[in-house]
Image: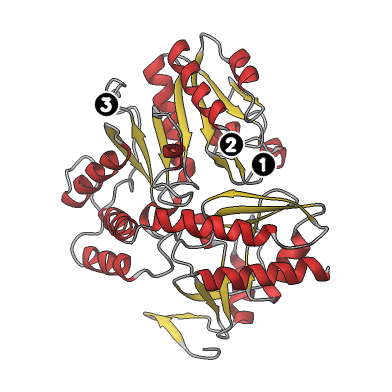
Amino acid sequence: MSGTSVSIGNIIIPSDSEAIMTLEGQYSSGVYGKRPLAIVRGKGARLWDAEGKEYIDCVGGHGVVNVGHCNPAVVQAITQQAQTLLTCPEMLHNNVRAALQAKLCQLANMGRVFLTNSGTESVEAAFKFARILTGRTEIIACMRAFHGRTMGSLSATWNKKYREPFMPLIPHISHVPFNNLEKLDQAISDQTAAIILEIVQGEGGVHPVDADFIEGAQRLCRERGALLIIDEVQTGFGRTGKMFAYQHYNIEPDLLCLAKSIAGGIPMGAVLINNRLGPIQSQTHGSTFGGNPIACAAALATIDYIETNHLDTRAAELGEWFVGRLRRIESEQIRVVRGKGLMVGIELKQKVTPYLQALMGENILALPAGLTVMRFLPPLVISKEELEQVAQAVEKVLLVK
């Protein structure tokens, strides 16, 4: 592949890794810490760089490609819709959008949906909806939580690395320890509009919620008039072994934030709104690109593929096997292996970055989750044989370093 001339119209696309990285290095904003790798192609659970080197992808676009890279059903839906209608604002009705809205509400047994372009936008919308529906201003989040990087969602994110450069943030947002129901109870006031919780704290270290905590949180919300916002931006659409991770527990979110894997790789998000809530006042929020036909078509194809191929069940079974396989690695560097479905973390006794770099040398791509946790978010179509290759590579780098 290296050296092959590629163009879009009259614009030449760089074709080798050095040229790609040089051009991006010159013109990119600089806000991203980039790995020395130029990816140009993907299929299923595999990625290829500009020179044709192949990798098993356990980054998955940060949990985006649950149905695999370039899933044929999603590609077909995008292609067909691109030849029909690219954009249609929500001031006008649209057939594909209508079908997706109905499907999403049916999946979660919710009443209505607001469509966005990303996870952080979904959280921002949920905060606005919670405030206008309750007439209250306070939001409670958890320590180690990650809810996004725009100003409202950033205010609910815990890590000071993300927060401190942008202080002061949105007022009336506080944090309590994750899985500590007593502290949550104490934090709720008559001005609490909502509690926002992750079912598995992904960026915070792959920490699953306790049933007593999440079910207790819903009870407290119902008793005190606050809303329960569940952030499933990373855990949704089969990742944890259910279509939505909250379905592992006896709860019904008031607002459900979705994104990442909703549209198979196309930018999209959503906020699902519980039937028990009243209508949201017209013109209180909006999005130019939210609910565009391309994203809606991709999402319908993605959801259909997940359901038809039972990817949620597959994630549960493969995840259980993968966690067990990783726990058999006899390395003094491992503190604990934890996860839910195919959202798996290995907590180490030292910083994780050198091990992630070593995994790249073994043709495996994985993520950090904090300073000491190695995180795996592979496409749910990954095979058991591919996961075994991942486990062998992890074993090799942990035993060597």
Residue name at image x 70 percent, y 67 percent: 394
Decide if residue 349 is in sight here: yes
Residue name at image x 50 percent, y 76 percent: 40
Q: Amino acid at mark 1?
A: Tyr
39 or 195: nearer the eye? 195
Residue holding disc 2:
154
92 or 261: nearer the eye? 261
Nearer-N-terminus badge (3/1): 1
Q: Which residue occupies the extreme bottom position in the image?
A: 3
Q: What secondary structure is found at the residue carrying circle 3?
A: loop
Q: Amino acid at mark 3?
A: Ser
Residue holding disc 1:
162
182 relative position to 100: left or right = right
Decide if residue 29 is in sight here: no
323 or 356: nearer the eye? 323
Residue name at image x 42 percent, y 54 percent: 261
Q: Are marks 2 and 3 in contact (CB under 8 Å)?
A: no
As measured in the structure, the alpha-carbon distance from the residue carrying label 3 to the one carrying label 1 is: 33 Å
Residue holding disc 3:
282
For the C terminus, which image quadrant?
Answer: bottom right
As measured in the structure, the alpha-carbon distance from the residue carrying label 2 to the one carrying label 3 is: 26 Å
Q: How many marks?
A: 3
Residue name at image x 62 percent, y 57 percent: 324
As measured in the structure, the alpha-carbon distance from the residue carrying label 1 to the one carrying label 2 is: 7 Å
Q: What secondary structure is found at the residue carrying circle 1?
A: helix
Q: Are marks 1 and 2 in contact (CB under 8 Å)?
A: yes
Q: Amino acid at mark 2?
A: Leu
Q: What secondary structure is found at the residue carrying circle 2?
A: helix
The x and y percentages for residue 341 are 51, 52
